[in-house]
Image: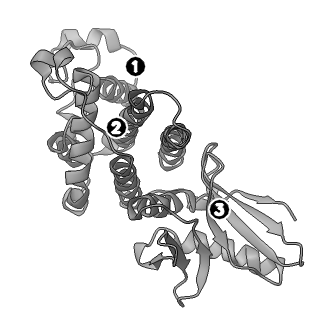
């Protein structure tokens, strides 16, 4: 679950980042009408919501089969037309499952349940976390932002992003702001990162090998020093290291990023003299391990930090030396 969910989520977030990047390029060059450009942002909101739902679906598939029987009692037996409401199981209901292992029937029932799962607000999100035996309280700090994301997605999909659902074509399209979308992305990344850290896993992180995740590139400068960069799944550089005199020291730097990237207290948030926001990732001894690019806003910087938290856990190193 850990490997697959991280890889799939990283791929989905990469698609969101591509849409945001496309919007910025269109906006920078004033390509197309304003609504064309902002519709790219609306698509990214739909992708963000889908990414959240897919993480929770994977959580169910991983946690429920061996979880509390009381939570399994809330899942309909596969083949029942119950709209996610379990019914009394009579012997006749089991005929279609004759000769099958109980484990497979449970798995297929959970599969069928998650395929119809929709999360349209934080009340439903909390309910599903509780069913997966995840404590809700540590994640409530993200609920306000995630709830507004889910409500906006609903408005985009079901009301064409107009506020008046009864008279949609005559209602004006609601404005959408790039900084708000980047804040939703940052909060979703942080939520998923904290959620994954709260789940015990058997395989150590170094055994992850999933496409579309981040990677490190180790290189040698023209003056003979060594450095590395961390790239997101879309190839964007999200962290650049200090210079090292030895290749082994640069490799140790990569290890240090992997060890520290998930801890928020290791990030030093700063403003450059030109007013741009950036951050440093520091080790426990306060030494700078890597520095981000410059961001136009603090919300964009937070999205960059969340991306390092996610992509920094990957172990792939491309040696360009």
- Mark 2–mark 1 Cα distance, whole angstroms, equals 36 Å
Picture coordinates of residue 95 (x, y %)?
28, 9
Picture coordinates of residue 94 (x, y %)?
26, 14
- Answer few, some or many: residues within 10 Å of disc 1's Cα (few below 14, many 20 plus, some between 14 and 19): few
Hey, which quadrant is residue 315 in on the image?
bottom right
Q: Are marks 3 and 1 in contact (CB under 8 Å)?
A: no
- The label shown at residue 210 is none
Q: Earlier in the sequence, mark 3 or mark 1?
A: 1
- Mark 3–mark 1 Cα distance, whole angstroms, equals 47 Å
Residue beneath label 1, please? 100
- Answer few, some or many: residues within 10 Å of disc 2's Cα (few below 14, many 20 plus, some between 14 and 19): many
Observer able to see residue 135: no
Judged by depth in the image, the label closer to the viewer, 2 or 1, is: 2
Q: Secondary structure at mark 1?
A: loop
Residue placed at 32% from the left, 29% from the top? 114
- Mark 2–mark 3 Cα distance, whole angstroms, equals 26 Å
Picture coordinates of residue 6 (x, y %)?
50, 48
- The label shown at residue 49 is 2
Q: Secondary structure at mark 2?
A: helix
Look at the picture and state if 43 lies above or below 247.
above
- The label shown at residue 230 is 3
Residue placed at 46% from the left, 56% from the top? 201
Q: Nearer the viewer, residue 254 or 180?
A: 180
Residue placed at 38% from the left, 60% from the top? 299
For the C terminus, the image quarter is bottom right
Q: Secondary structure at mark 3?
A: strand
């Amino acid at each position: 679950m850990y490997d697959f969910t991280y890889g799939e989520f990283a791929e989905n977030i990469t698609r969101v980042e591509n849409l945001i990047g496309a919007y910025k390029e269109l906006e920078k060059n004033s390509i197309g009408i304003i609504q064309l450009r902002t519709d790219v942002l609306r698509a990214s909101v739909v992708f963000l919501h889908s990414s959240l739902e897919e993480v929770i679906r994977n959580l169910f598939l991983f946690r429920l089969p061996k979880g509390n029987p009381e939570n399994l009692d809330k899942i309909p037996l596969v083949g029942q037309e119950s709209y996610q409401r379990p019914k009394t199981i009579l012997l006749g209901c089991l005929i279609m499952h004759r000769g099958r292992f109980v484990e497979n029937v449970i798995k297929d029932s959970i599969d069928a349940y998650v395929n119809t799962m929709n999360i349209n607000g934080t009340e439903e999100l909390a309910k599903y976390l509780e069913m997966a035996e995840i404590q809700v309280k540590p994640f409530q700090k993200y609920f306000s932002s995630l709830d507004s994301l889910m409500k906006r997605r609903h408005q985009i999909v079901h009301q064409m992003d107009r506020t008046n659902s009864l008279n949609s074509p005559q209602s004006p399209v609601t404005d959408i702001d790039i900084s708000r979308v980047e804040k939703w992305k940052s909060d979703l990344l942080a939520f998923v990162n904290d959620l994954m850290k709260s789940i015990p896993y058997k395989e150590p992180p170094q055994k992850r090998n999933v496409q579309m995740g981040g990677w490190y590139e180790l290189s040698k400068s023209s003056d003979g020093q060594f450095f590395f960069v961390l790239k997101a799944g879309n190839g964007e550089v999200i962290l650049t290291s200090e210079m090292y005199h030895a290749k082994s020291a640069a490799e140790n730097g990569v290890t240090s990023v992997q060890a520290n990237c998930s801890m928020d207290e290791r990030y030093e948030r700063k403003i450059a003299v030109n007013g741009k926001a950036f951050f440093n990732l520091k080790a426990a001894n306060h030494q700078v391990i890597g520095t981000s690019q410059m961001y136009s806003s603090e919300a964009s910087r937070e999205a960059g930090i969340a991306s390092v938290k996610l992509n920094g856990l990957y172990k792939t190193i491309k040696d360009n030396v």
